[in-house]
Image (tube, rainbow, N blue to C red):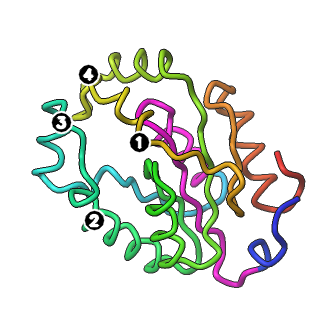
Amino acid sequence: MPDAAVRDTPAGHRIVVMGVAGCGKSTVGAALAAAQGLPLVEGDDFHSEASRAKMAGGIPLTDADRAEWLRELGRQLAAHPAGVVLTCSALKKAYRDQLRAAAPGLRFVFLSIGPDEALRRVAGRASHFFSKDLVASQFATLESPAGEGGVLSVDALEPLDALQRRLSAWLHGDGVG
């Protein structure tokens, strides 16, 4: 059952679509934003050039590399009090907590996917800066959000239209998905 205090917040729906590289954050986030009439903020757009170069070279980002990026994503969330969908890996609980501090009532959609499928998807992306060599490090860094309030975990392999309908229902309190 969704948390009524979160659902009834006057701030609107602020949602982070999260997960490892290749789980479909951008695709699902865009579908959810369109269905809810909310702006979409693509977290990858806010990585520094240095971080993009590291990832393109197969070098995992450190917490220090992510610090300013997470601060900026928090500012983006705070700048959209009427609602927003943000795509962001949010792999560690500390990262999610930092985003929650910037946007009270923030909800997360965790797109769960296996390592083999994530690697297949990332390897098939020709125009993205993220190296397929980093997929394993994403899984090593991931701290599952299971048990955290305001999080819905879904199978990233579900059809997009079914995922979008399920997420919309969850946001509007029509079931847990």
Q: Nearer the viewer, mark 4 or mark 3?
A: 3
Q: CA distance from mark 4 to mark 2?
A: 27 Å
Residue 30 painted magenta: yes
Q: CA distance from mark 1 to mark 4?
A: 24 Å
Q: Quadrant of residue 84?
A: bottom right
Q: Which residue sits at x=56%, y=41%?
A: 28
Q: Amino acid at mark 2?
A: Ala
Screen quadrant of the N terminus: bottom right
Question: Could you tell which of marks 4 and 2 lies nearer the N-terminus?
Answer: 2
Instruction: Say the numbered circle drawn on residue 141.
Output: 1
Q: Which residue sits at x=81%, y=62%?
A: 172
Position above or below: 157 against 145: above
Residue at image mark 4: 126
Q: Amino acid at mark 4?
A: Ala
Q: Position of residue 166 (x, y in %)?
A: 77, 43
Question: Could you tell which of marks 1 and 2 lies nearer the N-terminus?
Answer: 2
Residue at image mark 3: 59
Instruction: Say the numbered circle drawn on residue 67.
Output: 2
Mark 4: give few (<14), some (14-19) or many (20+) Cα within 10 Å: few
Q: Nearer the viewer, mark 1 or mark 3?
A: 1
Q: CA distance from mark 1 to mark 3?
A: 13 Å
> Tag 1's secondary structure?
helix
Mark 1: give few (<14), some (14-19) or many (20+) Cα within 10 Å: few
Tell whether label 3 touches label 4 (CB within 8 Å): no
Position above or below: 135 against 31: above
> Tag 2's secondary structure?
helix
173 relative to 95 in the view: left or right: right
